[in-house]
Image (spheres, rainbow, N blue to C red):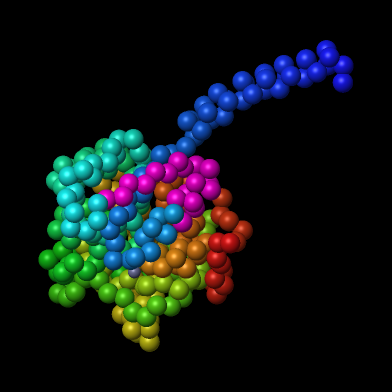
């Protein structure tokens, strides 16, 4: 190569680099939705794995930038757990443990009320039975001595009618660990639009008899809790959305073990739910690998 050609090529490469760095940085600053996953305590010992999995699923859409805030261990002082919620548009709750300090609870309420987004995953709806505002956010919860004092049961009957049931009884249970069909009840919501009405979820716990304030709550999907699986014989809510102030919440009861979170159905709802709570819209396409009515589909 001649000296002058080499010189021109070097300038060209340098120019491309200089132009490209601020361009891509500006793109990512503009596009990415900041998400904070909160974990650190959970009766599900696989929480470090599920946090890692969910972080990966969100990031692979190219829409989200994900941080993780891990609380102190059970029984340890919580005074240093003060996430700066204002840095985020979405908080994903992978937490079921000790109460946060009032300061942190109030900061979280203000964040959601002012328009922040929240995604509640599986046992996060077991958390904080005594924190009323949190229970308003999730709509329904289970365990932690929840019963009729915490609100009604909400489910669908065999005719497809939504039932609000104030009868006394426990809040939260599940039958055998098994694969089951999920049925979309609202096909017009941005999270569900374009998804198959019925799909097969990989083995998971099917929560039943959840109770809570159920205010401003819409059920997106249910699953039939069969009595021969030690269930209730009801169509139990498995995914719902609520409004809290200006904030949006997406709540999925799915996601007990790692294998349940490998389900493309679980992942698709997580990704779409996180976008919807952040922006009120969903721009993601339905994956070609979405599960069929009788066909489980797992993320590679
Ligand atoms: Zn579980």
Query: Is residue 104 visible in this depiction of the protein?
Result: yes
Image height of 86 relative to 178, above or below: above
Q: Most extreme residue toward the left, as rendered?
A: 149
Image x and y of residue 263, in percent: 50, 65
Front residue of 173/209: it is 173
**Quadrant hosting ligand 1:** bottom left
Residue at 45% of width from left, 50% of height from top?
55
Image x and y of residue 91, in percent: 34, 46
- Quadrant in the picture for residue 88: top left
Image x and y of residue 2, in percent: 87, 16
- Bounds of the magenta segment: 53-71
Query: Is residue 187 visible in this depiction of the protein?
Result: no
Q: Most extreme residue toward the top, as rendered?
A: 4
Residue at 27% of width from left, 41% of height from top?
83
Residue at 41% of width from left, 39% of height from top?
34
Q: Is residue 200 left or right of residue 124?
A: right
């Amino acid at each position: 190569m001649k000296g002058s050609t080499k010189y021109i090529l070097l300038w060209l490469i340098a120019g491309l680099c200089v132009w490209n760095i601020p361009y891509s940085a500006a793109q990512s600053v503009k596009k990415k939705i900041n998400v904070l996953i909160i974990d650190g305590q959970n009766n599900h010992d696989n929480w470090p794995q599920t946090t890692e999995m969910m972080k990966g699923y969100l990031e692979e859409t190219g829409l989200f930038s994900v941080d993780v805030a891990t609380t102190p261990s059970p029984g340890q002082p919580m005074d240093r757990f003060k996430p700066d919620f204002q840095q985020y548009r979405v908080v994903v709750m992978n937490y079921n443990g000790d109460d946060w300090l009032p300061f942190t609870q109030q900061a979280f309420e203000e964040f959601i009320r002012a328009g922040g987004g929240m995604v509640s995953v599986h046992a996060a709806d077991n958390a904080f039975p005594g924190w009323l505002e949190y229970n308003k956010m999730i709509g329904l919860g289970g365990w932690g001595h929840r019963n009729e004092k915490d609100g009604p049961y909400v489910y669908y009957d065999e005719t497809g009618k939504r039932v609000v049931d104030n009868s006394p009884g426990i809040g939260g249970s599940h039958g055998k660990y098994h694969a089951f069909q999920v049925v979309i009840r609202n096909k017009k919501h941005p999270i569900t639009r374009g998804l198959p009405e019925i799909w097969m979820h990989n083995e998971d716990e099917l929560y039943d008899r959840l109770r809570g304030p159920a205010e401003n709550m819409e059920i997106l999907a249910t699953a039939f809790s069969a009595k021969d699986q030690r269930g209730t014989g009801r169509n139990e809510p498995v995914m719902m959305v609520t409004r809290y102030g200006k904030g949006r919440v997406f709540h999925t009861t799915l996601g007990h073990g790692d294998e349940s979170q490998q389900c493309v159905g679980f992942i698709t709802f997580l990704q779409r739910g996180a976008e919807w709570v952040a922006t009120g819209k969903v721009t993601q396409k339905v994956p070609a690998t979405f599960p069929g009515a009788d066909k489980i589909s797992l993320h590679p």
